[in-house]
Image: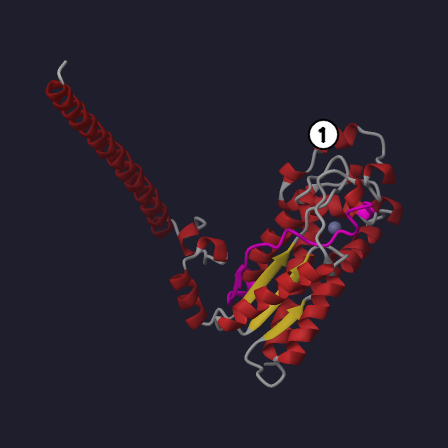
Amino acid sequence: MNSLTENRHTRISASSATAVQRSERLIARNINDASLAMRRLSRALVVLACCIAPQTPCFATTPEVELDHMTWTEVQHRLASGSTTILIPIGGTEQSGPYVALGKHNVRAYLLAQKIAQTLGNALVAPVISYVPEGSIHPPAGHMRFTGTISIPDSAFESMLEGTARSFKQHGFKDVIFLGDHGGYQKNMQKVANRLDREWANDPSCHVVALNEYYQAVSVTYVNTLRRRGFSMAEIGLHAGLADTALTMALDRSLVRSDAMSHAAKPTEADGVYGDPRHATEELGQLAVKQIIDTSVAAIKHVTATR
Ligand SMILES: [Zn+2]
């Protein structure tokens, strides 16, 4: 092939390749359009079902509360319509023995914050904070002795909370509420809330609250409920025991290895378990879910009503 023929051949190949790409893109766009149409149709059918049968749970009318799923304009609109409270769910990534997944606190804090926000009706939920202080990394202390636990310094955690609260004040939220699912950092949450409230004393357009009631609903109220039902403190436990495991099961059963747990010997502190989780059930956990939501909603209404 001479160079002229070769160039022409290359041009023809390139143009046919472009034509192929163009038709592939067209096909892909048609498929996307078709799936978008299907999604719109199914959403329309849900709305239609709600109109025809009002007793059917209507997802279309459930207000969105997660910032993660909203655009900035939607958040701005909700703020202008009176959703001026922002809940900051704080979890942690820590071991909870051989039967409960490492993200227990993250999943619980996020789901509970959503339920609390939906009940309040004027609150939105920030993304969950899942990196928290868990003690010394080297040498490892506490939960850090177990694989998968993540620990960050207290100062980094407090800076993250502070930056988060300042961000929401900047955007016009009036109440920033820290919901901490883990016991160890409650003091850090309180410290940050106190510091910002002192700083903003002359500009009270925004308040920060470390909601102790959220954590106490489990550590005090729920523990007392379980004791009244005949469970011992040795079984209820302090970490990954009956109380902790039941609450996790009630919110996301996939996080608990129930079958293996029910057939196992009692796990010990060497396994990372302080208590005995083997009699934990979803039903028991639902008691805690209700107590946390009721207590938190009442406490948030109380602190926001006085402003
Ligand atoms: Zn914890």
List x then y, in percent, for residue 299.
Answer: 66, 69
Give the x, y percent position of residue 284.
72, 46
Rendering coords of residue 192 (x, y %): 68, 69
Where is mark 1, residue-wise? 259
Where is residue 223 shown, x and y percent of the image? 80, 54
Decide which of 276, 99 is in the foreground and name it: 99
Q: Quadrant of residue 302?
A: bottom right
* Residue under the point 60% across and 86% down: 202
In reply to whether residue 254 is colored magenta, the answer given is no
Q: Residue furthest bottom?
A: 202
Taking the magenta stretch, the answer to whether it contains residue 133 is: yes
Instruction: Please state which of residues 173 and 160 is positioned toward the viewer in this rendering.
Output: 160
| Quadrant where the C terminus is found in the figure | bottom right
The relative height of residue 99 versus residue 239 in the rendered view (above or below) is above
* Relative height, residue 231 to residue 222 (above, below): above
* In the displayed structure image, the side of residue 88 where residue 192 appears, left or right: right
Tell which residue pokes out farthest to the front in this image.
Answer: 3
Residue 268 visible in the displayed image: no
Indicate the amino acid at tag 1: Asp
Q: Crowdedness of circle 1 by 10 Å Cα count: few (<14), some, many (20+)?
A: few
Q: How is the image coloured?
A: secondary structure
**Label 1 SS:** helix
User: In terms of depth relative to the viewer, which is nearer, 119 or 139?
Assistant: 139
Q: Main secondary structure of the magenta part?
A: loop
Quarter of the image with the N terminus in it: top left
Front-most of residues 236 and 93: 93
Give the magenta-colored segment's residue range. Answer: 118-142
Q: Residue at x 61, y 57 (%)?
A: 89
